[in-house]
Amino acid sequence: MGRTIPSWRMVVESEMTRLQRFGDSLRGEDKEIFADLLRQCKLYASAASALASTNKEFPLLFSMLFSQHRRITMLEKQLTLNSSIEPAPAKTKEYNPYAEYVK
């Protein structure tokens, strides 16, 4: 019997080809930034396949989101090490970004 469900990497390649139409409409530097964003899907493909989602876009978007969060965290660490900037308060358990709105 043949395999009926494509591998996650095949799904990623297919979706990246489809999304490339968006990238083709971008200008200059934005094209390279978009290409890098798509590469993040490949980077985390094995982790995304563990989500076993019926919606193929969700693992792709989650991979992109995770990659962005990882980059932000790394930049925060670099800023903290290289300057006197305090780390973002969201790293503490008691931080509530909506505290000023809730009474």
Image (tube, grey):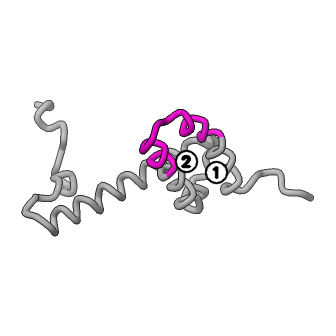
Residue 88 lies, in percent from the top left, at: 17, 54
Residue at horizontal 43%, vertical 48%?
A: 65
Residue 80 shown left or right of residue 60 in the figure: left
For residue 87, the mark is none
Residue 68 lies, in percent from the top left, at: 38, 52
Residue at horizontal 84%, vertical 56%?
A: 3
* Front residue of this view, candidates 47 and 13: 13
Amino acid type indicated by mark 2: Leu
Residue 85 lies, in percent from the top left, at: 10, 59
Where is mark 1, residue-wise? 12
The residue range painted magenta reads 18-35
* Front residue of this view, candidates 86 and 90: 86
Residue 95 shown left or right of residue 60 in the figure: left
Q: Secondary structure at mark 1?
A: helix
Amino acid type indicated by mark 1: Val
- How far is mark 1 from mark 2, CA to CA? 7 Å
Q: Secondary structure at mark 2?
A: helix
Looking at the magenta stretch, what is its main secondary structure? helix
Residue 102 lies, in percent from the top left, at: 14, 32
**Label 2 neighbour load within 10 Å: few <14, some 14-19, many 20+:** many
Q: Check if residue 82 falls in the magenta segment.
A: no
- The answer to whether mark 1 and mark 2 are in CB contact below 8 A is yes
Where is mark 2, residue-wise? 60
Where's the C terminus, which quadrant?
Answer: top left
Residue 35 shown left or right of residue 2 in the figure: left
Quadrant of the rendered image containing residue 23: top right
* Front residue of this view, candidates 3 and 60: 60
